[in-house]
Image (tube, rainbow, N blue to C red):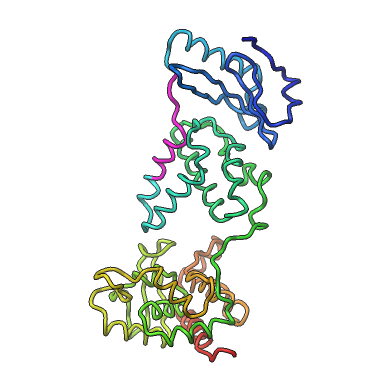
Amino acid sequence: MARNKLSETKIKKLDKAGIYSDGDGLFLRVRSGGSKQWFFIYKRDGKRTELGLGGYGQGTAPVSLELAREKADGIRQRLARGQELAARPTFSAIMEDVIKVKTAAAKNDKHKAQWAMTLRKYAKALHGKAVADITRDDVVETLKPIWESKPETADRTRMRIAAVIDHAKARNLFVGDNPADWKGGLKELLPARNKLSRGHHEAVEYKAIPAVIASLREASGVSARAVEFTCLTAARSGETRFMTVDEVDLDGALWTIPAERMKAGREHRVPLCDRAVAILKARLQVITGSLVFEGESEGKPISDTGMTKALRAAGAGDATLHGFRSSFRDWAGDETHHPRDVIEAALAHIVKDKTEAAYRRKDALEKRRKLMADWATFCGTAPKK
């Protein structure tokens, strides 16, 4: 087979997506976005193997035509001698190592499952590639199918791909800039995230909250009480579901959620309004175990599905339990004069500004108590007809 079919001049003019042969196993792949990557293909015992040789004219280590031919010659010589080419770790192999590390430190099973699912499902196009050969264009092509339809999932997938590449770099299995870093070049190739649908949880418009709460109070089930309590405290549904008796101080009207149950990994104190205290007192009279909102099975909390059904029954449409937090945030920002940092503290959000965080060392409990009392008053107002 003829060799040296390509030239630097010809390569620079290639703008149509496709695969172009230089001869005897060396190929150049041109992507629709214009990027170009070298790869070598050989067969042994009927098995086809593709080896990435790097990107043409891109990144911190671009591979010229001359260098690509030099690499190809090295591969041919080793194959001619009958030498086995050292198997290079694939993205999938490194990915599984990273999943083990990350999920070991995860706080809950749901987060563990999400970490593994996004990589195994949405990064599937990268699985069989040698991690050392993954390019920015590979990442772009992987994310394109979900970037606009599932923006939040797509960005989580991108960050987790970046974590796999960083892991490989730490083991000297990848050299160069991380191709999944947003500021490293992806922002030039994909629509800006703030221009996409953010994929936030569907929320009840805050002006409709009193009507939803009124409907919940007409229901007698434990799920309805858990949903109402979640709304009144602006908590996450999981924090409510797994709430235990020893976390509650009824005399002090305080709920202390331990760090291991919080998303941010730090203890969160929740001031309780009178209605929230009343809900807890009623629950403590009927529970048989340590869980405040226990389900039908002994030792098990009520299900997220059960709470969602109660929310739907209260006329919340497609709104989610998590959406209550958005409703609360919108109400606090639009209808009150409570300081922003107090509102954010009520949501257990971490202050990202380091200077502000240095001054905000306490959790503004008493200020938040007044905020949550105002929220409870609003939630309990007669719904508008």
**Direction from residue 116 to residue 192 in the image, left or right:** right
| Label tally | 0
333 and 252: which is toward the camera: 333
Q: Which residue is found at the position 32% from the left and 80% from the top?
A: 249
Q: Tell me the quadrant of the picture where the N terminus can be found.
A: top right
Where residue 174 appears, x then y in whole percent? 50, 32
Q: Which residue is found at the position 53% from the left and 85% from the top?
A: 211
Question: For residue 96: magenta?
Answer: yes
36 and 306: which is toward the camera: 306
Where residue 123 appears, x then y in whole percent? 51, 43
Q: Magenta region's main secondary structure?
A: helix
When the figure is inspected, residue 358 is found, relative to residue 188, above or below; the finding is below
When the figure is inspected, residue 355 is found, relative to residue 240, above or below; the finding is above
Image: magenta residue range: 85-99
Which corner quadrant of the image does residue 341 belong to?
A: bottom right
Question: For residue 134: magenta?
Answer: no
- Looking at the image, the residue that sits furthest to the top is 81
Q: Which residue is found at the position 43% from the left and 24% from the top?
A: 87
**Direction from residue 163 to residue 23 in the image, left or right:** right
